[in-house]
Image (tube, rainbow, N blue to C red):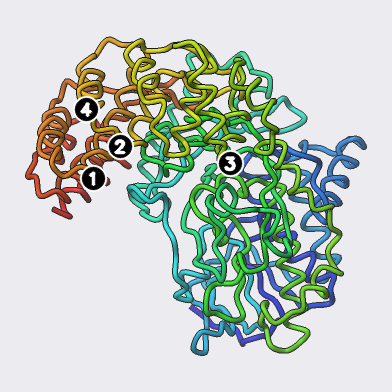
Amino acid sequence: MGKKPEIDYDVIVLGFGTAGATAAIAAGRMGARVLVLERNTYAGGTQSGGGIAGFYGGPPPYGLTGEIDAKIKARQEAGGYGGELELRKWILEEEARRAGVDIRYETTVYDVRRDGRRVTGVRWCESRVLFEAGCRVLIDSSAEAVACRLAGCELLSGRATDGLYNTFTNTCLASNGKRAAGMNFDAGRINQYDPEVFSQTMLETAELHVLEDYSAGGPAGHRAALSDLPGIREGFHVLTEKVLTINDLFLGDAARIPDPIAYAFTNLDTHTNDMPLESELFQDWMVGASMWGTQLWFPVIRENLVPKGWTGILAAARHLGVDHDIGQAVRMNGAMGRLGEAAGVLAALAARAGHGDGLAVPMASLKSHLADIPDRRGENESVWGLPSEAIRAGLESDRPGFAIWSARHQRRVAELRAWYAEAAPGSHLRRHAAMALALLDDRTGVDELRQAVVERDEFLPLTSRHSNHLRGYACLYLLGRLRDVESLALFFDVLRDGALKNKYEYHTHAVAALIKIGEAHVAKRAAIAAFLRALAEDPAWELRARLKETQRYPRIDQLFRLRIAVILRQWGVPNQIGQAVLAMPLNAHDRALAAKCLAER
């Protein structure tokens, strides 16, 4: 390979996708000398070649993202060929070149130059030629934290129970002859950091698009090809100067988080179908109150972009400094576009000052260059700020979620106890008051929660536009949350029932409840361990759950078997669960998980 001479830039942007493109344009418009390194052959990333057009939820995109979107729409109305996906590629590249940005496609970054914990440049390969360039600020908009990983920044990975990420979309492009559009199909989990497992998973899940008859096109047109980019919703997050968490939003006061630079207005759009393995606070929201579709304002702050202890590098894509739970909201396209714009402005200002330190840039200077929207985080109060009379009315209704969450957020224990005592057994008011009390760690309503499980209560709340949770297994979840040791026999009974409706949800929440009780009550651990071991080693135990946007019901019990194996190992209980899982028909992702579980014994 040949080697070209070194050149210097104020700002280098790794990745020309939703965040990277706006970062490059914003920095270029600020007068910075900017280089973009993109591994593909076009701009826009997931919003163009990935087939995901438009913006999910909330108001129209604002700032530079809104400007670009308006230009795309205008070009469409003027008869631009290819629809939004193709026009986005052209317009982003046009705007970047107008801003003086140098763009290099088909590049592979293989090293990040650094001086201690200060990033000073990058090295990459392009057309079998090695290049390197210096910079004052490197913006990592690769989504997979490529630059941050090469530099050695600390990372966070997945959910707390097993480190797994959200599910991914295997997207297919369709065409009606004039425009291209993406067709989303959830395809389970993928490990994008293991090349062999990644490739095999992509091959296995491509069958989602196989049809018997290709002559009839759907609403998007005829299937044309798999998209260039899979719809990967989550990967590593960078440990930044401040990592925003679900606790900050639900247990603190989001309105007090200082100086947001970007916002997402959306729901916590999880596509996971193994909810009992998610965090407890996340399940409180999703299962205990059935709030999947509720939209909130999620702030992003400058410190979420700055890797902890590092200078000269910013994380500006879905790997920014937020936890697994909040990441399911701020990954949305509109928020990513704004995040890129803010990073581009911040990088240009830091480079202009000569220090490359994003934290040293005055907030007033940063905000003066950002076309902002009003701070609307106070609107979250409409979700958890209901007055007492509205809470009671909500608990008596078929849409109890806002009332349950307001009672929990405001800690209205005395009123909930009073309403519970006066309400008739089995009534909405009594059951929903019991659920709200359980979310406050109050055991007043445990008898009502147990009865709901015994009855397999089929009431489905209408709080959310969809993805609500049946009250029966929601109450089971809450009993587990309370570590209700007196419900052991009830949980065993649920798991012995192989014919009950919603078996998947009941069984998985019962497994999670038993693990919580075993952790909290050592005296009961042996009995729980024996039951769980027999269950997880039994090849006849089968659980299936639907992948969103499909009619596919893959087996999910292997994930819970492996979770049981990990817990039993921690409890010092020998078992053959890993071997039992490896004997099952598995996809590439789960085969790798099972092999890892066995290797860690």
Locate residue 561: give its quadrant: top left
Does 523 sit left or right of 221 as displayed?
left
Q: What residue type is labelled 2?
A: Arg
Name the residue at 92% across, 37% down.
Answer: 78
Quote the CA–CA distance across marks 2 and 4: 10 Å
Q: In which quarter of the image is residue 356?
A: bottom right
Where is mark 2, residue-wise?
483
Residue in front for this viewpoint, 550 or 510: 510
Instruction: Say which of marks 3 and 1 sits in front.
Output: 3
Q: How far apart are marks 3 and 2 (CA)?
A: 21 Å
The residue indicated by pointer 4 is: 488
Question: What kind of residue is marked 1?
Answer: Glu
Point 45% across, 27% down: residue: 547
Of the numbered discs 4 and 1, the one sitting upstream in the chain is: 4
First in residue order: circle 3 vs circle 4: 3
Q: Residue at x 59, y 81 (%)?
A: 311
The CA span between labels 3 and 4 is 29 Å
Dot placed on the residue nearer the N-terminal end, 3 or 2: 3
Q: Horizontal and vertical percent for residue 552?
A: 42, 21
Q: Residue 590 lies in what quarter of the image?
A: top left
290 to the left or right of 134: left
Tell me what residue is drawn at x 19 percent, y 30 percent. Answer: 584
- Which SS class for mark 2? loop
User: Identity of the amino acid at label 4?
Assistant: Leu
Q: Is mark 1 on a helix, strand or loop?
A: helix
Q: Position of residue 386 (x, y in %)?
A: 69, 33
Q: Is residue 34 above or below residue 339?
A: below
Residue density around tag 3, few if under 14, some if 14–19, many if 20 or more, within 10 Å: some
Kindly identify which residue carries mark 1: 519
